[in-house]
Image (cartoon, rainbow, N blue to C red):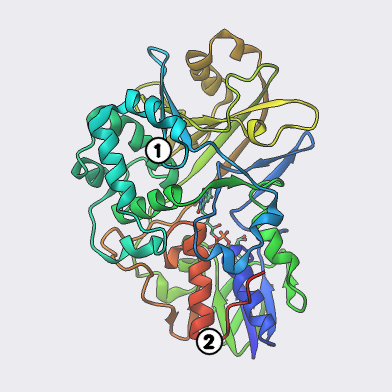
Amino acid sequence: MNIAVVGGGLAGLAVALGCEQDGHDVSLFEASDALGGRMKTLHVNGHPLDAGFHVLHTAYPSLARWMDVGALGGKPMDACTMTIQPSTGKRRVLGDALHAPRYLFPTLRSVGVRDGLRFLRWRLGTSGRDLERSMDAPTPTIKQGLKQRNFSASTRRVLEPLFAGITLDPSLSERMAFANFAWGAMSHGEMIVPYGGIAAVPNQLASRLKTTTVHLNTRVENVTATTVDANGETMPFDRVVLAVPQHVAQEVFSPLDGTHKPVERLTSTVAFVTKTPPYSEGRLLLNEEWGQHGNDVLHVHLPTNVHPHPAGEHWVVATLVGAPATSPDVESVRHELRKWFGESVSNWKHLATTTVRYALPHIDPTHHERFMSEIEIEGVLLAGDHRAHPSVQGTLRSAERILEHLKIPIPKEV
Ligand SMILES: Cc1cc2nc3c(=O)[nH]c(=O)nc-3n(C[C@H](O)[C@H](O)[C@H](O)COP(=O)(O)OP(=O)(O)OC[C@H]3O[C@@H](n4cnc5c(N)ncnc54)[C@H](O)[C@@H]3O)c2cc1C
């Protein structure tokens, strides 16, 4: 078959790879000048800087089918999160004691025995073998779900920013089922940062493409079951796979326009260079007062604590989500971080600012199946995270579903 794949992010790359390995002629259309989509890494001062905080969960079941994870040279983040109350300077540590027993007592000191047991019950309720199981039942929103799990208000001050960061949604309106999935992924594997940054993941798939014709800088304007319109030309194909982000899919394929109207999720990072890092571990520092007046920074991480900079630079990256991420102001972020780390922040040099618009899809909160049911609408095949759930696992599963639908085998494990 002559197959068009529109969109060169992770979903499009996986579909293209599966199709070409099954002997089909594949044309891959990508609007930008590079493959990889939202898994994007900049190179600043000779070191990778991801556009948005992004980790790879080794527990994702699809990962082993598509990736040589070992070849990514990934290093794990700490099996713990640290929190700060900027107004008091108080910090807490919440760790996964089953992963790393050294975090048992610090975690119990942070959340108390009752919430410690609630964490344990939640963890034991997730299935390492079927992480996506939780998606199959109707659930409340994350905001409501955390309350229903009876976590104290003090522990919710940690969990709410944590899940706002995972879903890039300050209102926590995503399904609790997704939080359960994410909790399971964190519990049953590691969160690794690839050596070359998160773009190393799609780059590995792209490097395996042999016969696919890749058209970069080619924005597709419209698709039907058998045609692709780009650069003023209508090109015929046997099958068309649309693997673009949610908001673009609605623009280029009119039958999607009348479906669920998504809310944009966006995130920005403001990165600084400092001579002395404020902490030395590869972990997040979450803001317990996030969302209160003057507390726009959701969390901070130091990528150079995971993969050291070759020239010894130390990078501090502050993450914002929602409205404050629209046009981040370096000096406002610096002002805020002075409350976290003291006056030395005044001497930090601004390194880079990144903003990702439409960073994650907004899935209809009433949806309660692990995958969106429509894989084919009016003959067009639909892939990408918006067809499943907003994660690398959801993205790869959406590609696998397209291949299964076309009776094309998923490429052999690498
Ligand atoms: C900041 C950030 C952090 C994240 N963190 C995590 C995480 O820690 N763990 C996790 O599991 N997931 C995470 N994700 C989610 C994960 O990265 C995405 O779900 C996944 O990359 C989506 O891949 P995709 O192929 O569906 O879409 P995309 O990557 O968006 O790919 C779509 C491609 O289509 C192209 N395109 C758009 N319009 C057109 C057009 N008209 N014609 C042709 N091409 C077009 C785009 O340029 C893009 O390359 C994160 C995402 C972001 C943005």
Q: Residue 355 placed where, x, y %?
A: 57, 41
Residue most extreme to the front: 101
**Residue 286 as seen in the image, left or right of residue 310:** left
Query: Cβ of disc 1 within 8 Å of ligand 1?
Result: no
Q: Name the quadrant containing residue 390.
A: bottom left
Residue that mark 2 sits on: 406
What secondary structure is found at the residue carrying circle 2?
loop
Q: Residue 135 placed where, x, y %?
A: 32, 62
Q: Residue 23 placed where, x, y %?
A: 69, 87
Identify which residue, 189 or 142, lies in the foreground: 189
**Residue 21 as seen in the image, left or right of residue 170:** right
Identify which residue, 66 or 364, lies in the foreground: 66
**Residue 374 as seen in the image, left or right of residue 51:** left
Q: Name the quadrant containing residue 290.
A: top left
Residue 393 numbered mark, or none: none
Asked whether disc 1 touches disc 2, contact meaning CB atoms under 8 Å apart, the reply is no
The relative height of residue 329 versus residue 364 in the rendered view (above or below) is: above
The relative height of residue 339 versus residue 165 in the rendered view (above or below) is: above
Residue that mark 1 sits on: 162
Q: Residue at x 54, y 38 (%)?
A: 268
Q: Residue at x 24, y 47 (%)?
A: 145
**Residue 125 as seen in the image, left or right of residue 413:** left
Q: Residue 374 placed where, x, y %?
A: 39, 77
Q: Does any portion of residue 290 appear in the rendered image?
A: no
- Classify the position of ligand 1 by quadrant: top left, top right, bottom left or bottom right: bottom right
Q: Name the quadrant containing residue 277.
A: top right
What is the three-letter code of the residue carrying label 1? Leu
| Quarter of the figure with the N terminus | bottom right
What is the three-letter code of the residue carrying label 2? Leu
Q: Residue at x 74, y 41 (%)?
A: 43
What secondary structure is found at the residue carrying circle 1?
helix
